[in-house]
Amino acid sequence: MISFSPHAELPLDLVLERLKIAAERPFEDARPIPPELHHARAFLNREREALFMREWICIGRADEVAAYGDYLTHDIAGVPIFAVRQADGSIKAFVNACAHRFSRLLADETGSRKRFTCPYHAWTYDCAGALIRAPFMEMKNGFDPAKHGLRELHAAIWEGFLYVSLADAPANSLAEALAPLRDKVVGRYDMACYRSVLRETMTWNANWKNLIENFTESYHVPFAHAKTFAGHRKPLEDYLCGEDSDHYGYHRAAQPSDDRPGAAHPANDRLSGEWRRMMVDFCIFPAHLVTLMPDYLWYITVQPAGTDQMRATWGVAFPPEVLADVPEADYKAWLADFKSYMDIANAEDKPLVEALHRGTASPILPQGALHPIERNIWQFTRYLAKVCGAYP
C-alpha cells in the first residue's frame, strides 16, 4: 500500500487545471489520466461529492432481489444503502440506517424479509420503509410514526442492472442518458434475461480509477490475460471504439468464429450476423463496468476506499439458454469451474492495476501516450473534467 505520495496534498485548483489540460487535448494527442487525480485527497473529496453522491451508481442485478422482500445491501461513498423488492414488483432503495439513532439495520449483503427490525431498540419497518413499530414511543408526546420512516433514495433498473442515486433530484434520467447505447449496441442482447449466478467483493490497493482505466481498454488483453481472455484470439485491429458520450464509453470486437466460447448458443434467437459472436466492453460513468458476450456477462461496480484503495463488487450472469444446458447434478461443479476462471482473470489484473497506482505516485514521469483502442480512457477523462468541475 502507498504510504506517501507527493501528490497527496496538492490543492484542488491545481489538480483541476491539469485535468482540464488533459481533457482539452484531441484524442490524437491524448495522454493518460493525470496521475495527480489518483492521489490528491482534495480530488477524492470532489469525486465523492460530484460523482458518487450525485450520479447513478450500479449496486448489482435486479434479479438478485427477485421476490417480494428480497434485499441487497451496498455502500456508496460511505453511505450504507439497501434495495428491496416491493409487493407490486417494483424496487425501492433506502439508507441502511434506523430512523431512531441511525444504527445500521442490515448487516448481510443479501437476504429476504418482510419486516426490518433495528437490533438496537427494535424499531421496525415494512418493505416500503414505513415505521410500523416503535416500542414505548407512545411515551413521547406528539410522536408520529408516519414522520419517521426510512430515508428513501432514487432507484432505477436499466437492462437488468439495479442503480441507485443519492441525489435529492438526479440530474438525468438513466434510461434517457443510456438510450443511444441501448438502441445502437447492447439492447439486442436483452441483458435483463441473463440470470445472476455469482457475486463477490474484492479490495485492491489502487485508486478506483485505475480499475476503470484497466477495464476500458483491451490493449493489455493479449499480454496480461494469457490464462483467460487472450484465448478468444481477437486481433487488436478488430476492436472498434464507440461514439463519444457524456454518460458511457464502449468498444467491441467479434470472436473469430461461431463455434468458440463467447459465441451465441444455437437456441439464442435474439442475435444475428456478427453480433452472435460480438463482445462489447462498456463503462457506464462513473463506475459501472461490463463485459457483455452472447453467452455470459461480467460486471464490476467500483467504489473508492481512499486514494490508494478501492472496493469492487463483481458478478456474472448467463442467458437462460446457456443455463438450460447445464444438468442440475453438474451445476455446482460447472459454476465452481467458471468462478475459478474469473478468479484467475482478476488475479491477472490485480498486480497490474496496483502497479499502475504505484507508478502514478511518482512526481517525475514520462509524457505518456494512448493507443488507438484506448479511446475510452480519453472519454472517461473528459467525463471527469466535465462533472468534477474542471470547466468553470
Image (tube, rainbow, N blue to C red):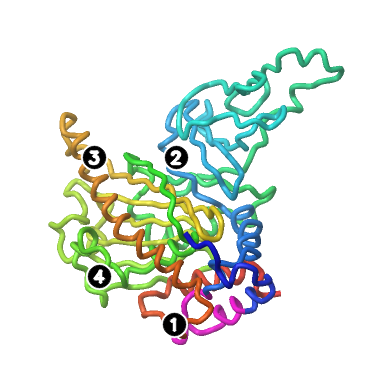
Task: Provide the secondary structure element on which disc 1 rests.
Answer: loop
Quarter of the image holding residue 205?
A: bottom left
At label 3, the amino acid type is: Leu
> Residue tagged by mark 2?
62
Q: Position of residue 242 (x, y in %)?
A: 40, 70
Q: Find the residue positioned furthest to the right.
A: 141
Viewer-closest of 25 and 118? 118
For this view, does 202 lie left or right of residue 54? left
- Vertical side of 107 occupied by 35: above or below: below
Q: Position of residue 21 (x, y in %)?
A: 59, 82
Estimate how packed mark 1 is, as few (under 14), some (14 to 19) or many (20 or more) residues with alpha carbons within 10 Å: few
Which mark's residue is nearer the viewer, 4 or 3?
Answer: 4
Residue at the spot 50% in from the left edge and 81% down from the top edge: 364
Number of on-image labels: 4
Compare marks 2 and 3 and give the one earlier in the sequence.
2
Task: Provide the secondary structure element on which disc 4 rests.
Answer: helix
Residue at the spot 70% in from the left edge and 17% down from the top edge: 134
> Residue tagged by mark 4?
223
Compare marks 4 and 3 and give the one earlier in the sequence.
4
Q: How far apart are the two marked residues, 4 and 2, measured between alpha carbons?
A: 35 Å
Compare marks 4 and 1 and give the one earlier in the sequence.
4
- Vertical side of 309 occupied by 134: above or below: above
